[in-house]
Image (cartoon, helix red, strand yellow):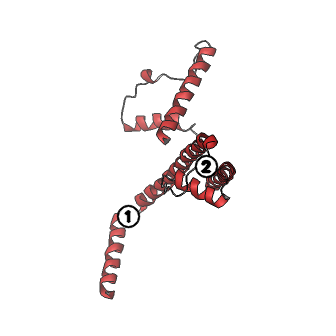
Amino acid sequence: MNRTYTEFLKYKYQVWRRFRRWRKKGRIRSNSVKIGEVIIAGGEDEVAEFIWTHLENTQFVEIPFLLIYTLLLSYAMAASYAISWMEGWTIFDAFYFLISSVLTIGFGDLVPVNDKFVLVTLLIVLIGLVLTTTCVDIVGAYYIDKLHFFGRRLDSEVSFGRLTGIKNMCSKII
């Protein structure tokens, strides 16, 4: 579901860019280079220099975790309130239903019974599923990058020596 949502956003952006170019009547910026025209010849230094010159203007955005957690919590509270109003449940029951549905656990002990709002409830859960998977993906990618760079900094011989030392200490204790 998250991948489909991401592909949809990419497609939407591509259509928007085509429309923008069409509106400008095909004018191309003077500093743009078509990918088919880029030819990188030479050694590794020239390739690295080419990549560095084109990536130095790239801006990476880091989303604060407080914003992600606030977004998830506020969505859960608003959706719980809406579901509790539609189904006549307590807010805690609605929150339990929402979390178990969004995390795809779905015990089945709470089921929406109001026929008028079944599609609205389904839409609320679907939006929560997309939002939750997107936020988990952002946080997971951040921590995987941190672990990757942390692992690269460790000296393999020193870390191996530490592990063998810990193993020896544990075997002496037992």
Q: Residue at x 35, y 78 (%)?
A: 166
Neighbours of disc 2 within 10 Å: few (<14), some (14-19), many (20+): few
Give the image quarter of residue 168: bottom left
SS label for mark 2: loop
**Cα gap from disc 1 to disc 2, whole angstroms:** 31 Å
Q: Residue at x 37, y 28 (%)?
A: 41
Q: Which mark is residue 11?
A: none
Q: Residue at x 56, y 28 (%)?
A: 12
SS label for mark 1: loop
Q: Is residue 172 left or right of residue 11?
A: left
Q: Residue furthest bottom?
A: 173
- Type of amino acid at the residue the image marks with label 2: Ile
- Type of amino acid at the residue the image marks with label 1: Asp
Q: Which residue is mark 2?
A: 63
| Residue 129 visible in the shown view | yes
**Which quadrant: the C terminus?**
bottom left
Q: Is residue 162 left or right of residue 118?
A: left
Give the vertical position of 168 relative to 150 (above or below). below
Q: Is residue 65 left or right of residue 147?
A: right
Give the image quarter of residue 90: bottom right
Work out whether mark 1 precedes mark 2 in sequence or the reverse, and give the earlier one: 2
Q: Which mark is residue 155?
A: 1
